[in-house]
Image (spheres, grey):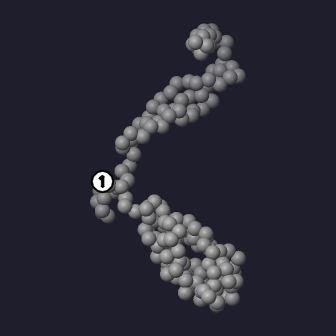
Amino acid sequence: MNSTIRLGLLAAVTLGGCVARSSAGYYVREVHADGDHLSIQRCEIVLIGDSLDYGDCRTTDVALPSRYQGPPGAAGGSGPPSPLPATLTGEQIARGINGVRDQLEACRLQYRLPSSILLRITIDAGGRVTDEVATGVPAAAGACIGEALRGARFAPSQRGARAEIPIRAVP
C-alpha cells in the first residue's frame, strides 16, 4: 500500500512538473531459459529527484543456437549434445604430457635446467597445445620445451583446458 501511495504522489508531482526524472540505466531483472530460447527481462532504473526508482520493464526473447551442429559440412543440425567432456581431467593431461616426457627431459638435460620445471599450457578443444610457458628457464630452453609440448596430443574436449604442470627429472 505504501508503494501505491508513493506512486500516486509521484505521478501527481511529476504531472505538476516539480520533479525531474531521468534514466540512470538498466538492470536484468529475470532470465529464463525455455527449450531453444532465452527470455531476458530488463528494467529501467530512473532517478527521480535524488532517489532511485524502477521504470518500465521489457522482455526480450533470444533464440539459442543448437549445441549439436551435425557432422562436418552439414548445415545447421540438431540432435544429441556432444559426447565430449566439457574439459580435460588431470589424468588426461598427464597422459598427453607423458607422450612427450622424453623430449622434455632431453631439453632439461641439454640446457642444464633444474630438476623441476613449472609449465603453464593451454590446450585447444582438438587436443593440441596452443600456448605454453616454462617458468624460470632461458629463452632457448623455453623454445625447446615449447616444441616438445606442441608435439603432445590430448583427448578432444568441448573447451580444451589450461593447466600448470610441474615436470620433474626422470629418475
Report the quarter where the C terminus lies. Answer: bottom right
Is residue 153 among what the camera can see?
Answer: yes
Instruction: State the image coordinates of residue 73 (x, y, percent, origin top left).
Output: 30, 63
Q: Residue at x 30, y 54 (%)?
A: 79
Instruction: State the image coordinates of residue 48 (x, y, percent, origin top left).
Output: 65, 21
Q: Residue at x 60, y 86 (%)?
A: 170
Instruction: State the image coordinates of residue 99 (x, y, percent, origin top left).
Output: 49, 81
Dividing the picture into quadrants, the one containing residue 35 is: top left
- The residue tagged 1 is 79
Dot 1 falls on a residue whose secondary structure is: loop
Q: Residue at x 67, y 74 (%)?
A: 135
For this rendering, which residue is in front, 20 or 112?
112
Dividing the picture into quadrants, the one containing residue 20 is: top right
Tag 1: residue type? Gly
| In the rendered image, the vertical position of residue 110 relative to residue 80, given as above or below | below
Instruction: State the image coordinates of residue 159 (x, y, percent, origin top left).
Output: 47, 61
Report the quarter where the N terminus lies. Answer: top right
State the residue lying farthest toward the bottom.
Answer: 110
Q: Residue at x 52, y 65 (%)?
A: 161
